[in-house]
Image (tube, rainbow, N blue to C red):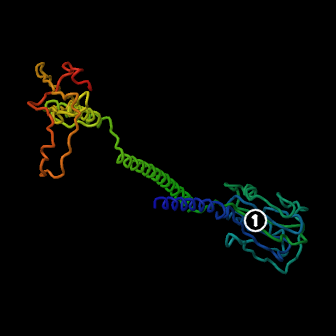
């Protein structure tokens, strides 16, 4: 919305500036105004009444078009009327509007010709130039005395050679200083709106850029959060907290009594081996007959530090083992399938066994007798 408003303000502002430029150039009022009259049958001369040339100011141009060279004679109205006599001529009496000169036809049936002004010594000033003749109004103003005239304004006699019409067209042009009053306001308002639009556009661009940066940061934070959900990182502060917690837990554990625990892994394997060692029955070296299969000693419990205390065997705790004679290879009669059959008990022979008078405690390695237990 802000961008649309900025664009609208810039467009309207540029439009206002454009209107101001057009109002000062193409639509500007005319810098001059001209009053013109076209004469079809003016007679031998044309007389412009005093003061008509200065209606629009003392600046401007008088343009006269004739059939031949044009002569301008400033003189008093009485002198001009005496010079023309009964001739036919035309008077320019005023400016009814800024585009037209008012005229009056004098003595339309009079003499169509008059003597040429250039051949008479009656006029102190005669200005002659080729057609079309252009005379600055300021020069005529000076001839009339300027701002402080010594006499009333004079009339102006316009003629050619006296035999042809005095003039075909007469145009008086005055400069004007006119401007469109709304041009400065349109330009100023347009410039102000354009500047405001540019400011809004810059603000919108900055805010959009900030939002994009914030969105990118949020995406990064979400990605970091997803990674933290899988493997949460431990910051330096959290690591110090965890270390402090572990130290406190270790201190508490050190003050509590140790509890027996079951060994696992490598220590479990060593325990099994020790159990097998203690549970292995004694065998006769020569004959290999197993004796005392149930003579297993007690096994000390394993502590938390995975060490098994070994109970030493007293030096006098040894007892001789009953040995089976070397000739004890007599076969044992088979037992009848029916234990109640007569003579079944007579066909059996008792087997000597070792009396377990007392459980044999485990012996230390120092009391080991290689001759007594050659299999170790």
Quadrant in the rendering for residue 283: top left
* Residue annotated with mark 1: 155
Quadrant in the rendering for residue 164: bottom right
- Is any atom of residue 259 visible in this view? no
Q: Secondary structure at mark 1?
A: strand
Q: Would you say 268 lies left or right of 47 here?
A: left
| Residue 348: x %, y % from top left | 15, 42
In-front residue for pair 98/305: 305
In-front residue for pair 55/180: 180
| Residue 111: x %, y % from top left | 88, 76
| Residue 51: x %, y % from top left | 70, 64
In-front residue for pair 227/125: 227
**Is residue 326 positioned above or below 340 on the image?**
above
Quadrant in the rendering for residue 306: top left
- Is any atom of residue 291 visible in this view? yes
Q: Would you say 48 lies left or right of 315 here?
A: right
Q: Would you say 189 lies left or right of 317 here?
A: right
**Is residue 87 positioned above or below 302 on the image?**
below
**Is residue 349 positioned above or below 38 on the image?**
above
In-front residue for pair 339/51: 339
- Mark 1 neighbour class, 10 Å CA radius: few under 14, some 14 to 19, many 20 or more: many
Which quadrant of the figure contains the C terminus? top left
Q: Would you say 323 lies left or right of 76 here?
A: left
């Amino acid at each position: 919305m802000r961008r649309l408003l900025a664009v609208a303000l810039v467009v309207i502002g540029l439009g206002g500036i454009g209107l101001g430029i057009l109002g000062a150039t193409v639509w500007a009022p005319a810098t001059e105004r001209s009053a013109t009259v076209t004469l079809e049958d003016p007679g031998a001369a044309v007389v412009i009444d005093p003061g008509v040339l200065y209606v629009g100011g003392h600046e401007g141009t008088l343009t006269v078009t004739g059939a031949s060279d044009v002569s301008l004679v400033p003189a008093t109205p009485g002198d001009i009327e005496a010079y023309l006599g009964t001739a036919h001529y035309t008077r320019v009496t005023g400016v009814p509007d800024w585009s037209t000169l008012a005229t009056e036809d004098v003595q339309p049936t009079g003499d169509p010709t008059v003597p040429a002004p250039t051949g008479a010594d009656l006029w102190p000033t005669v200005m002659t130039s080729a057609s079309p003749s252009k005379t600055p109004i300021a020069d005529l103003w000076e001839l009339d005395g300027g701002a402080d005239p010594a006499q009333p304004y004079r009339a102006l006699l316009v003629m050619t050679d006296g035999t042809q019409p005095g003039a075909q067209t007469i145009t008086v042009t005055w400069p004007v200083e006119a401007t469109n009053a709304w041009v400065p306001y349109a330009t100023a308002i347009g410039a102000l709106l354009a500047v405001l639009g540019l400011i809004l556009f810059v603000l919108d661009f900055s805010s959009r850029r900030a939002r994009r940066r914030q969105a990118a940061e949020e995406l990064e934070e979400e990605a970091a959060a997803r990674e933290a959900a899988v493997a949460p990182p431990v910051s330096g502060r959290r690591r110090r907290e965890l270390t402090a917690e572990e130290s406190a837990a270790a201190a508490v554990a050190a003050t509590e009594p140790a509890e027996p625990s079951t060994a696992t892994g490598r220590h479990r394997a060593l325990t099994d081996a020790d159990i097998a060692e203690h549970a292995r029955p004694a065998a006769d070296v020569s004959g290999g007959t197993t004796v005392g299969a149930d003579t297993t000693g007690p096994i000390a419990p394993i502590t938390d530090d995975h060490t098994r205390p070994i109970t030493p065997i007293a030096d006098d705790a040894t007892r001789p083992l009953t040995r089976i004679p070397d000739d004890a290879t007599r076969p044992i009669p088979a037992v009848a399938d029916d234990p109640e059959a007569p003579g079944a008990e007579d066909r059996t022979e008792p087997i000597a066994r070792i009396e377990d008078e007392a459980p044999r405690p485990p012996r230390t390695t120092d009391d080991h007798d290689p001759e007594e237990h050659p299999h170790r």
